[in-house]
Amino acid sequence: MSGVRVRVIFIDLQREYLTKGRPFYLNNIFPSLNNAKRILELARQEAWEIVHIQHFRNVPDSLIFNRSSEFSGFIKGFEPRSDERYFEKNSFSCYSNPAFAAFMEESRGEQTYVVGYGTSKCVLATVVDGFNRGHKLIVISDATYAKAELGEGLSEEDMHRVLLATIKSSFANLIITADLCRGFEKEDLLSVEYFRESSVLGPMACLSWSAIPEAQKPQTQDGASELMKY
């Protein structure tokens, strides 16, 4: 990608998706969340343009994505830095914010990757909107995930797989985290686990794994830290 400017858009890396009991909680978020963090670290190392999106419902007493709720805050480790771009939205598509739409229109030549939540709503709406505006977006398929539609008998994985097929067939290209990291000789990032969950950790599940004291990390029989999955 020599000579091509690279941008990564991080959509709604918010605690609503990570917190058990919340309506948008994702049972199997951790693999995609780890990949999103790896990509953020890669983007910062390579000095790519980083764009953070935060969703707030435009309803004062909303029970979800309420501006005053702690669950609307960024997942720890995904907070924007002062030199990174930030936009708010109150609809599914990032383009619902006119400032974001203008920003994207002014910089069409950049290689733009999309990461975040969820595949069925905000990621899908954004790539469809981008496609209709002539913007070429690339979805990092294992750094996003979808909420289950249990009424339709579709698990999180089922929904994610179907939606990725829809995105690929018509609206955007797909890439996986490993291929992106290898393209920049950053394979070492693939061995890093930033987020884990277990009953031992409790509320520490949303902390950077490296910040958790060794004594509080669950151990396997051979002494290696155990990767916890929902």
Image (cartoon, helix red, strand yellow):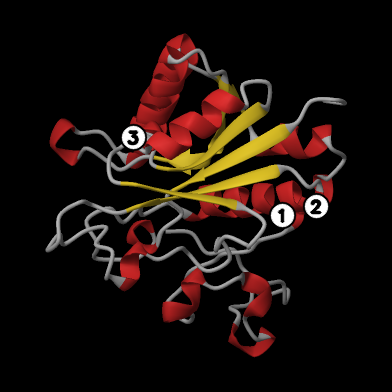
Task: Provide the secondary structure element on which disc 2 rests.
Answer: helix
- Which residue corresponds to the image point at 71% horizontal and 38% vertical from the top-left? 178
Relative to 86, is 25 on the left or the right?
A: left
The numbered mark, 2 or 3, whose residue comes first in the sequence reads 2
Quadrant showing the N terminus: top right
Between 152 and 23, the residue placed more toward the observer is: 23
Relative to 211, is 90 on the left or the right?
A: left
Compared to residue 113, the image places residue 223 above or below, namely below
The numbered mark, 1 or 3, whose residue comes first in the sequence reads 1
Q: In the image, which is nearer the foreground, mark 2 or mark 3?
A: 3
- Which residue corresponds to the image point at 39% horizontal and 22% vertical from the top-left? 129
Q: Which mark is residue 45?
A: 2
Mark 1: amino acid: Glu
Distance from Cα at disc 1 to Cα at disc 2:
6 Å
Relative to 73, is 138 on the left or the right?
A: right
- Which residue corresponds to the image point at 87% horizontal and 40% vertical from the top-left? 185
Distance from Cα at disc 1 to Cα at disc 3:
27 Å
Residue that label 3 marks:
96
Between 178 and 87, the residue placed more toward the observer is: 87
Mark 3: amino acid: Ser
- Measured as percent of width and height from the top left, residue 119 is found at 39, 35
Compared to residue 42, the image places residue 212 above or below, namely below
Task: Provide the secondary structure element on which disc 1 rests.
Answer: helix
Distance from Cα at disc 2 to Cα at disc 3:
30 Å
Mark 2: amino acid: Gln
- Measured as percent of width and height from the top left, residue 61 is found at 12, 63
Residue density around tag 2, few if under 14, some if 14–19, many if 20 or more, within 10 Å: few
Residue that label 1 marks:
41
Marks 1 & 2, CB-CB < 8 Å contact: yes
